[in-house]
Amino acid sequence: MQLLPLILLPAAASGAAYLVRSVRLRSTILIGTAAVHLGLVGRLWGDPGSPVPGAWLAIDPLGLLVLSLVSVLFLVTGVYAVGFLRREPPRGGRVFVTGLLGFLAAATLVAVSHHLALLWVGMETTTLALAPLVYHRHDRRSLEAVWKYLLLSSVGIALALLGTFFLAAAQSWGHPLLLEDLIAGATSLHPSLLRTAFIFLLVGYGTKMGLAPLHAWKPDTYGEAPSLVAGLMAGGLTSCAFLGVARITEVTIAAGLASFVQPLLLSFGVVSLVVAAAFMIGQGDLKRLLAYSSVEHMGLLVLGLGLGGVGPYGTVLHLVNNALTKGVVFLAVGNVVLATGSASADEAKGILRRLPVSGVLLLLGLFAVTGSPPFGLFLSEFTILNAAIAQGHPWIALAVVVLLAIIFVGMASVVLEVVYAPAEHPAPVDRESLLLVGGPALLLAAVLMLGLYVPLPLHRMLMAAAQGLGVAAP
Amino acid sequence: MSGLHELLLLCVVLTNFWVLGTTRLSSTIRATAIQGALLAALPIALHPSWSIHTIGLAAGTFLVKTVILPSFLAWAIREAAVRREIEPLIGFSTSLALGAVAVALSFGIAQRIPLPESDSSLLIPVALSTVMVGLLVLTTRNKALSQVVGYLVLENGIFVFGLSQVERVPFLVELGVLLDIFVGIFIMGIVVFHINRAFDSLDSTRLTELKD
């Protein structure tokens, strides 16, 4: 029963934020809720509680990881949002905070629900809660972005609902769709209905993850949404969607259909990397560049999941690294946008002189997000490559290395130019508020630490989560 | 009672063709309202045991799909002063023909889906054909509002499919699903309204500023 407050607290705070008129009080509600949420999640690490059979809400290693990522990222984003709303015109401040807190409630529901239909409800709610935030600027471009986002995500999520019903049809007992029951009774699930369910759920939640070729909404949405919202999507929303894919993969592999699941996951992974590499070359908009980088990392996540062996461990480690790094780069780009008024790479040239701290964050974030040592993403990408070779897919390993190299060149050519090139319109050095650079700097430190050393409790949790995903049937 | 749900399901297919074949937006909205009412009657016709579960489901469905959403969408087109779908990507007669193909295809597929116990032999084919018609409308119509209607039809198809599993998915979850769909369409309607104001048109083909 310690899980229900985790959902109800942000939901109630979301309603309160809508009713409150004072900006100060609203900011307090936002940060206070985020901090209490993180505290409650931290307590779950010490004492996950004993599992109640038949409970719809439960905590397991993978769910706890996703929940913690969302919670950490949300606190950082929340603090940033306070600084951001001071600089932006006040329009939308009320809806903005309400939507953010609504997202936190829905994402928590996704992370803790072991009832797969309830998980769907949470997933759809995350989509809807963020829609008004994408439209924050109220102009034509953001309108187009929110329309594409809503329509494509809704169709994707509708297909996931169809998949959920197929899953219900595949089981022969009369119980609700509880994850534990499904895994325990996996071998008695109807195989061809389970396959159909897997395909629909993979396509549905894959659309929300932004796996290519289902990623069409992603560049537009990330490009037009305020950077902190895009960061929350790239780090939090996609992690939730990945959890959906991981849950159904767990069930399907437990049913002994690994040979059906793995090729599908691998092909989505490779196609995502290819698409990301192709569109990152010559990309002139920083946020769209990061959106394709997100497609790349989602591809790596399902790739590791599909490889088996140490692949799932690499995937969960990558999940953690990706979420934290996306927070760093999107918030750093957000500062660039606040200073120059656009995310276009040409306008942002010479940003290191103008915004020394954000410039450095952007530069280091570039190395982190492309998986350079000594950052955490290097370690997780290396683990996934290792899995590819160990599991007998040397060609996939080779393709991934080549594609990652192309992506590195594509990203570096844009970001290095932005950071170092002489400014076209030299501007004085801006004073950077601690609210706007403190959070991303802390996240960057965490990513750096994860590249050098994974703390023991986290390592244990990652192993436990990977074990749930990697029970390969003979 | 066994004949009643078959009749209702056939009427669902007819409303699909209505949506496909009509140019007037207000008429397509009326078609979805009627489809919503048919869907609300289905759980009662299928499970005439009058449990709280089926009655709650029927009442909720009727309220959302027949009363609130259609009147909201009708309000949106009245405010936006659009009446007709102009020149969709595929002509009306072609989309009707494609709708017929979808129905035939669904019957073919439904026979090959090994569903354990089904309450009605028509349930699955009607569900699948409604899903396909929804996708067809979504992809081939230009007006943003028609696309919302397409999404609604798609959701209706999934709802019919879900009815075959009504005993397995508990009431609370169904309420959540219904609420999510409701809010989703509501937000879409608001966006449609803004599109009209910003672009002086509900034409989603004008949304082409964002590209690589």
Image: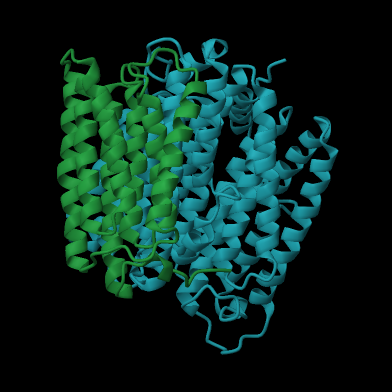
Total labels drawn:
0
- A303 left or right, relative to A80: right
Q: Residue at x 32, y 24 (%)?
A: B163
| Residue B118 percent location from the top left of the image | 37, 16
Name the residue rendered at 24%, 45% in the picture: B32
Q: Is residue A66 left or right of residue A312?
A: left
* Palette colour of chain A: cyan
> Where is residue B61 shown, x and y percent of the image?
21, 34
Left or right of A344 on screen, residue A21? left
Chain coloured green: B
Compared with A212, A354 (above or below) is below
Q: Quadrant of residue B82?
A: bottom left
Asked if one can make out residue A27 in the rendered structure from this viewpoint, the answer is no
Q: Position of residue A281 (x, y in %)?
A: 70, 67
Question: Where the N terminus of chain B falls, by quadrant?
Answer: top left
Query: Toward the viewer: B82 or B209?
Result: B82
Q: Nearer the viewer, residue B208 or B90?
A: B90
Residue A428: percent from left, percent from top:
52, 86
